[in-house]
Structure formats: C-alpha cells, structure tokens
Image (cartoon, helix red, strand yellow):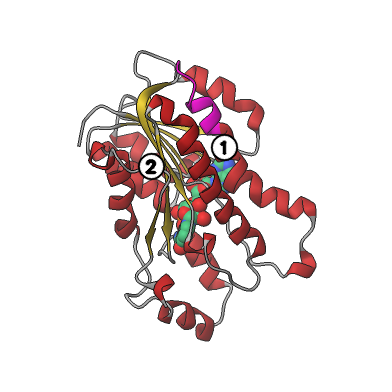
Amino acid sequence: MAVNKKILVTGASSGIGLALCEFLINNSFSVIAIGRDESKVAHLKEHYNSDSFSFESLDLNNFENYNSFFDKHLNNLKFDGFVHCAGMEETLPLSLYTPERMHSIFNINVFSGVELLRYFSKKKYSNDRASVVFISSVMGELGQPGKIGYCATKSAILGVVKSAALELSKRKFRINAVSPGVVNTPMTQKLFESLDDINVNRIKEMHPLGIGEVDDVIPIITFLLSDTSKWITGQNLIVDGGYSIQ
Ligand SMILES: NC(=O)c1ccc[n+]([C@@H]2O[C@H](COP(=O)([O-])OP(=O)(O)OC[C@H]3O[C@@H](n4cnc5c(N)ncnc54)[C@H](OP(=O)(O)O)[C@@H]3O)[C@@H](O)[C@H]2O)c1
C-alpha cells in the first residue's frame, strides 16, 4: 500500500472509524479525523504527531462549518481518500416517525457525507484518483421492522455511490460502499443493551459466521482505499458473516 496518502475519516472517535484511523496511522497514512468527542481519541493524540493524526471535533449536522474545516486542512498535501463512517442507528415504529425525525437520521447518515464529498471533490482539496468509501449496511438492501429510517438512509447511500462514481469518474475518483452486518462496536453494544437476551441471541444467530469485529471490516475499507482496487467503482461490498445470503 502506498504511504503518505492523506485520508479524511468521519466517525473517527468510535467503532469502525476509530479502528480505521489506528490502522491507517500505523501504515504511514496521514489521517484527518472528524468526530465529536475528542476524549475518545486522546490515546491517539498522545502517541502520534499532527502529521500522522489530526482530529477535528465537529458536529456534522452543522454544515456551515465544512468550508472552514477544508480550508484549515488546505496545504501542499491534498486528500487521497475519504471514508464516511459517521452515522447513527435507531429503532422506531412507523407510527412515531415524523419528517423531522427522518431528516435527523438522513442528516448524519447521508447528507453530511454528500456535503463532505462536494467539498472533497474540489480540485484544490483532493488529488485525481482519490478513493471514497461510504459505510452503508446490509440494511441498505434488506428490511427490518422498526428500521424504516436507518434502512432508508443506508439504501440512499447506495444510490449516492453509483451516481457519484459516474459523475466523478472524470477525475478518476472511485466511490464505493461497504455494507457490514452486525459488528461489535459501541453502536451495537448500545443496541444490545436495549434488547432482551432472546433478541440479542436471535441477531447473533442470524449471522452464520457470528457477528463481526471491526478487524473484519477494516481490510475491506483499506482494500478500497488502495490502488489494488483501482478498477472497482460504484460497488457495494457486503461483509456480513453470511447474514444476507439466507
Ligand atoms: N456496528 C454495526 O453493527 C454496523 C453495521 C452496519 C453498518 N454500520 C455503520 O458503520 C458506521 C460506523 O458504525 P459504528 O458501529 O462504528 O458506530 P459508533 O461506534 O456508534 O460510531 C459512530 C461515530 O459517528 C460519529 N457521529 C455520530 N453523529 C455524529 C455527528 N452528528 N457529528 C459528527 N460525528 C458523529 C460518532 O462521534 P462521537 O463518538 O464523537 O459521538 C462516532 O465517531 C455507521 O454508519 C453505521 O451505521 C455499523
């Protein structure tokens, strides 16, 4: 894998995004990370200098701050990659959905990613042949009761990926999605805490190879960031321990 590439990672303070940052830093990438809670990356800030790891505490719902974020990181090293890991999950019956509620989950799961991509795709911020990875979910192609908002956002990402891949191919950008099944992260721990043991076991049993760990997903993302995947674009790579083949 090439070294010294500059990668933007959202959701960098937890779960998949945090594990990705750790992998990238340890493999000589320069990581510009976005999350909200800076205390969760204190260990990284302590061990690595700002050339390797720079963290911005940014609520991605505040779209008006994106311009200054990109300008702050405008230097002789342009971005080569962007991974949108930031996201939220919720379980809510249709009867409780309002347009505001739908808007709120779309804001972070989809709209923030599209707006970041809009800035990222400007020539002054990124190099040609950049690679972009959106974290969708198996729920982008499957349904589940109580998951209308979450499933809708993850399906929307798949549409964004295909259209953006075509539109940005003029710069030889590659835009792909990774769709995990249930992975052991703080998001999943929170979900499991809200369920009884029977339902937790049901979810685990729906994964023929068991639920995943972040280490099962990171290699797929880094493969898409690398030049090894230079002819892959507009695709959705499912990594789910067999969940979706049933
Ligand atoms: N875990 C799974 O089983 C699973 C399965 C399929 C897909 N996914 C997807 O994978 C992605 C990462 O999931 P995860 O399990 O790693 O989740 P996680 O541990 O809950 O981490 C979510 C990340 O998103 C950030 N975030 C949330 N709202 C934000 C906002 N308004 N502004 C800025 N950052 C915000 C959080 O920042 P703070 O920590 O600072 O709040 C955190 O870094 C999500 O898109 C999720 O839907 C996860």
* SS at circle 2: loop
Q: Position of residue 13 (x, y in %)?
A: 45, 45
- Please give the residue where the numbered disc 1 appears in the rendered image: 114
Residue 217's place in the image compared with 13, above or below, is: below
- For the point 57% across and 77% down, the residue is 195
Amino acid type, residue under disc 1 in the picture: Val
Residue 239: which quarter of the image? bottom left
Q: Farthest top residue?
A: 76
- Please give the residue where the numbered disc 2 appears in the rendered image: 233
Q: Which residues are magenta?
A: 116-124
- For the point 47% across and 47% down, the residue is 85
Q: Quadrant of the N terminus?
A: top left
* First along the sequence among labels 1 and 2: 1
Residue 77's place in the image compared with 185, above or below, is: above
Residue 170's place in the image compared with 83, above or below, is: above
- For the point 27% across and 39% down, the residue is 226
* SS at circle 1: helix
Residue 93: which quarter of the image? bottom right
Residue 235 visible in the picture: yes
Q: Position of residue 132 (x, y in %)?
A: 41, 38
Q: Residues within 10 Å of mark 1 (few under 14, many from 20)?
A: some
- For the point 49% across and 79% down, the residue is 200
Q: Which mark is residue 200?
A: none
Is 179 left or right of 87, judged from the image as shown?
left
Q: Position of residue 83 (x, y in %)?
A: 42, 41
